[in-house]
Image (tube, helix red, strand yellow):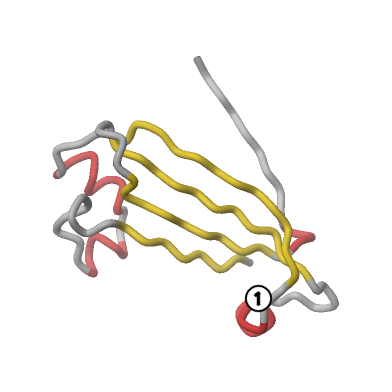
Amino acid sequence: MMSDTSYFKKSIVKGLNEKIIAGSIYDHIKQNLDFKIAASKSIMKVESAKDSDFKELALGKNNCVGILENAVYNDMGKLFEYTTIRYIPNEYALISFDQT
């Protein structure tokens, strides 16, 4: 279980509506917008749980959450997405695959 909060800069990610959001914002970007996704920066950490975490996540006896913060940039170097994902600690795993 996780809690995901994403913000998209509306001056860059234009034309969002409920149908696009329910489907794939990234498909919308790739198919309809005039920019490419160039880079992202991720920060992974653990923090003390907030009141909202206890309400939204089944933390049980856990008093902390795993957090992934992700910032995504377009090919002009502009930040267009910022996402924070909050995880239950014993369900938190990082798996990375890089290909060159």
Question: In this picture, is 20 found above or below 33?
Answer: below
Residue 38: image x %, image y %?
Answer: 34, 31
Q: Is residue 34 left or right of residue 98?
A: left
Mark 1 residue crowding within 10 angstroms, few (<14) / some (14–19) / many (20+): some
Question: In this picture, is 80 found above or below 7?
Answer: above
Q: Quadrant of residue 11?
A: bottom left
Residue 61: image x %, image y %?
Answer: 85, 77
> Which structural element holds mark 1?
loop
The residue located at (65%, 77%) in the rendering is 53
Q: Is residue 17 left or right of residue 83?
A: left
Residue in the foreground of this view, choosing between 77 and 64: 77
Residue in the foreground of this view, choosing between 2 and 38: 38
The residue located at (46%, 57%) in the rendering is 83
Question: In this picture, is 53 found above or below 69?
Answer: below
For mark 1, what is the residue?
A: 57
Question: In this picture, is 60 found above or below 84?
Answer: below
Residue type at mark 1 is: Leu
The residue located at (66%, 63%) in the rendering is 87
Q: Is residue 100 left or right of residue 89?
A: left
The residue located at (46%, 66%) in the rendering is 5
Residue in the foreground of this view, choosing between 64 and 20: 64
Residue 81: image x %, image y %?
Answer: 36, 52
**Most distant residue in the top direction:** 100
Residue 34: image x %, image y %?
Answer: 14, 38
